[in-house]
Image: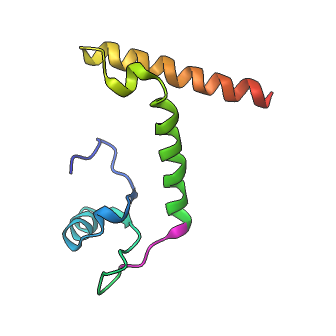
Amino acid sequence: MELPCHKPRLLLADKGYDGDVVCQSLLLIGISPVIPPKSNHRDPIPCNFRAYKDRNRIERMFNKVKQFRKIATRYDKSKRSFAAFLNLAVARIWLRNFVNRA
């Protein structure tokens, strides 16, 4: 798993990543896995469900961004133009929420 330059404290993931190999490799590098255990897991790892609730917010953000067809289908050829349109889409979403709150 490729990690960003800044080492996170927690890794939020869904049940698909509930494997001993994944959890052990994360713990070895100092990252706490926040993964709910599968129902058939023999030795379930305890999960911090309070922190896991933040994953829902992240998923909702990605769903809002994917409403822009150009992002969902990745029409842009270069990384730079894709990142530029992604920034525009996120700014539009933020502005819509900001104006409604004010």
- Which residue extends farthest right? 102
Q: How is the image coloured?
A: rainbow
Compared to residue 45, the image places residue 99 above or below, namely above
Compared to residue 56, the image places residue 47 above or below, namely below
Residue 76 lies within the magenta run: no
Which x, y percent locates residue 75? 30, 16
In which quarter of the view is residue 40 placed?
bottom left
In which quarter of the view is residue 96 placed?
top right
Which x, y percent locates residue 98? 70, 27
Compared to residue 99, the image places residue 80 above or below, namely above
The range drawn in magenta is: 45-49
The answer to whether residue 79 is left or right of residue 85 is left
> Going 52% across and 39% down the picture, which residue do you hit?
61
> Going 49% across and 62% down the picture, which residue do you hit?
52
> Going 29% across and 87% down the picture, which residue do you hit?
42
Which x, y percent locates residue 81? 33, 12
Prevailing SS of the magenta stretch? loop
Query: Total of numbered circles in the picture?
Result: 0
> Going 56% across and 21% down the picture, which residue do you hit?
91
Which x, y percent locates residue 84? 40, 15
The answer to whether residue 58 is left or right of residue 4 is right
Q: Quadrant of the C terminus?
A: top right
